[in-house]
Image (cartoon, helix red, strand yellow):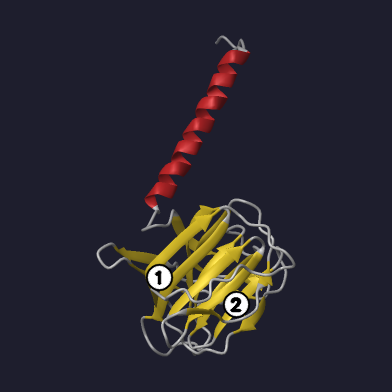
Amino acid sequence: MDKRRIVWPAACLLVLAVTVGSNIRAQEKRRAAGSAVGIFEGHGDVGKVLHAGAVEYDAAKQTYTIAASGENIWFDKDAFQYVWKKMSGDITLTADVSFLAKGGDEHKKAVLMIRQSLDVDSAYADIALHGNGMTSLQYRDDSGAQTQEIQAGVSMPKRLRLEKRGDHFSMWLVDENGRFQPATGSARVVLKVPFYVGIGMCSHNDNVIEKAVFSKVELKSEPATALLQGTPRLSAGQDGK
């Protein structure tokens, strides 16, 4: 048997490396395209969940129904189903949000969220609508930090809006006249670009799957602004359509 070694020219190794890299990137693009839903690029469970989540998009009604288990979106780690799009700049995310079924854990959460990454302990800011009607601006200002919240004085609002202006995030809710008003103060979370923008659901009980419906979803972006003294750019008086 001829045991001579085969020596590959450097040029051949380079071509092989480039080809393998291109194939991997192509596979990643196909997976991302396969998980695209509605206006969003992808979806999946963030963190450890007992039951895999899912999302259904009704193109005719333009609604997203998210099913999820997961223990919580809180403390220093999260577990939930997230439907997302990578973006940059200033963001306005608006949606009608409701739970498909009554009951369940009073702190199950349907969220509008902007987060740095899909890591379990990522920095983020969101509006969380709880099963008991409580609505809050939640935020984790650094990876692995504890989640903080600012609660609104409104219970079970129908239409929610999360705004990112520079490094500041604010929560807007539709009032009795159908117009958006600021519901709390703002929170500062510094995110690098790109970041993830989307909608999510957590049952707050890993043994149970709960569902939330997001409709009339609007997602807008514009170049980032530099805000002075941490003051968010207000949009009061905008109607709730």
Residue 171 pos. (x, y %): 56, 75
Q: Residue at x 59, y 20 (%)?
A: 14
Residue 124: name its quadrant.
bottom right
User: Viewer-proximal residue, 75 or 6?
Assistant: 75
Q: Secondary structure at mark 1?
A: strand
User: Viewer-proximal residue, 214 or 2?
Assistant: 214
Judge whether residue 205 can be spotted in this image: no
Rate crowding at label 1 as few (under 14), some (14 to 19) or many (20 or more) other CA atoms within 10 Å. many
Judge whether residue 23 can be spotted in this image: yes
Which comes sooner in the sequence, label 1 or label 2?
1
Using the image, determine if residue 229 lies above or below residue 135: above
Which residue type carries mark 2? Leu
Q: Secondary structure at mark 2?
A: strand
Q: Residue at x 62, y 14 (%)?
A: 10
User: Viewer-proximal residue, 70 or 111?
Assistant: 111
How much space separates mark 1 and mark 2, taking CA atoms? 20 Å
For this view, does 144 lie left or right of residue 13?
right
Nearest to the eye among marks 1 and 2: give it: 2
Residue 72 pos. (x, y %): 57, 76
Residue carrying label 2: 137
Q: Quadrant of the C terminus?
A: bottom left
For this view, does 217 lie left or right of residue 16?
left
Residue 148 pos. (x, y %): 68, 77
Residue carrying label 1: 66
Using the image, determine if residue 85 lies above or below residue 54: above
